[in-house]
Image: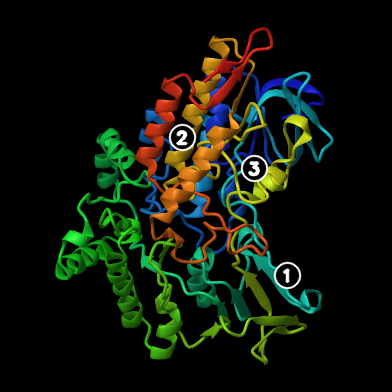
Amino acid sequence: MSKSTNKALDLVIVGAGFAGLCALHHARAIGLSARLIEAGSGVGGTWYWNRYPGARCDIESLQYSYQFSDELQQEWEWSERYAAQAEILSYLEHVADRFDLREQIQLDTRVVSAHFQEDQERWLIRTDNNDTLNARFCIMATGCLSSTNRPRFEGEADFEGNVFHTGEWPHEPVDFTGKRVGVIGTGSSAIQSIPIIAEQAEQVYVFQRTPNYSIPAHNRPLDPAEQKQVKAEYSALRERASQGFGGSDFLAINALGSEASAAEREAEFEHRWALGGLYILGTYADLMIDKEVNEQAAEFARKRIRAVVEDPETAEKLCPDQVIGCKRITVDTGYFETYNRPNVTLVDVSTSPIEEFTATGLRTGGEDFIVDTIVLATGFDAMTGSLFKIDIRGRGGERLKDQWAAGPKTYLGLMSNGFPNLFFVSGPGSPSVLSNMVVTIEQHVDWITDCLKHLQTEQIDTIEPKSDAVDRWVAEVNAIAAETLFMGCNSWYLGANVPGKPRIFMPYAGGFPAYRETCDEIAANGYTGFSLTNKNTTESEL
């Protein structure tokens, strides 16, 4: 679409992934003039950028999809149980076309600043293309895992080979045939990509600081008859999922593992391991609360690793010793089996960190590893990274980054005090990364859309949360997390993967159903905890 300068709009949306496309569709439905700004050359968000080998969703495709349109649900055919990056990207491109969204999407444009103009009560948004947009409302649909975490190493400029980050993968295929490859990291993107890289490469060195739990996906093509049956009962599936802790149908059991015998728990873990994927998360309601129940699940997973990896020493290095689930569990295809290949070597850097890059590879523990290519599977600056790349300033010129210097401060993960009419989708303080992202994205977009309709109907100019409501919500998020085992390890949920980032548990750990109920209750009661103002009337004290 053509660019505009000084364009006055009702709404500017930043980011063209699941959240941004959904927000644009809903904004149009209520008659708002809207523009979506996207840094990439195409829609897709995370699924546009993350093209590394093996990139695939860890939520089943029939659940990792929009539900705002039953026609869309019925017409789109997924090919696999767990959709790969290319298929999810095709799906989102189809959504943009099917709902005629592209005319209001501006690609190849990065938002550099968003400043609230108090005299006008509007947001002034500037881009790297020197565009200026003036909008009453702004929605940050920038994603939770979209800002790459790229640690710096001594001697990087000396390395003569190629360096790729899994979150910024080239759009053209990378051929590893005959190459010696060093992979730094053993998180989700590494676990998905290493088996595929190992099939091509001459040698793969995996540099591991912390081992992660991973469960076989048991991925397979979706039988057309199975897909037809699910679609015939889609509403029932969505309803079950909405009652699940993370907004997915993981066959959750409301029973407590602490009330089951060790043998009963073992049998249930066995059953769910056979199902594959994240079904183990639904095993018991107290899996992330009761240490004994969690430890049995963790040891069950470790026994599986030992049974697969042939070399006992390597197997032990791959066995995590932390709480299972305190880091997002990974879903894999043949990851642990890959370490049985003669061309794959695990290098433990937990006690001897990587010292430097050299012209020909890496040095760690005084040993040189000769490689042609280095893959940085070092993850993301989660939850806040993409927001902080934008110079966001609210009332009095206060920077969001400064307000959040000691950790994110939001109300419901949706808004922050001092930043009127600025919404976050899946922001810190919401279930976000502890959930099926598409489900929680739609819940947020629905809430925001209803809020904007309310403001229109009541002729209200601005909405923002009160500072005491923010403080109470932050305290509640922290209190809930403290009662769980999510605090049992240094995870990116806490920002622990980024040097200097405050160690604050960022997502809401009380579960999607409880969170949604809270949001609905607040809206039904006239937006409790928010200040709603009109230039011509007094502030609505709620």
* Left or right of residue 103, residue 248 in this image: left
Secondary structure, mark 2, is helix
Q: Which residue is mark 2?
A: 442
Q: Residue furthest bottom?
A: 366
Mark 2, Cα crowd under 10 Å, few <14 / some 14-19 / many 20+, is many
Residue drawn at (55%, 18%), measured in percent from left and top? 541
| Mark 3, residue position | 42
Instruction: Looking at the image, tell me whether mark 1 or mark 2 is earlier in sequence order.
Output: 1
Residue 91 horizontal/vertical position (percent): 49, 42
The amino acid on which the numbered mark 1 sits, given as a three-letter code, is Arg
- What is the residue that sits farthest to the right in this orientation? 130
Rate crowding at label 3 as few (under 14), some (14 to 19) or many (20 or more) other CA atoms within 10 Å: some
* Residue 493 location (% of width, % of height): 52, 56
Instruction: Name which residue type carries label 3.
Output: Gly
User: How far is the residue under mark 3 from the one under mark 1?
Assistant: 29 Å
Decide which of tag 3 and tag 1 comes sooner along the chain: 3
Q: Is residue 220 visible?
A: no
Name the residue that disc number 1 marks.
152
- Of mark 3 and mark 2, the one earlier in the sequence is 3
List x then y, in percent, for residue 264.
15, 65
| Nearest to the observer: residue 19 or residue 501 | 501
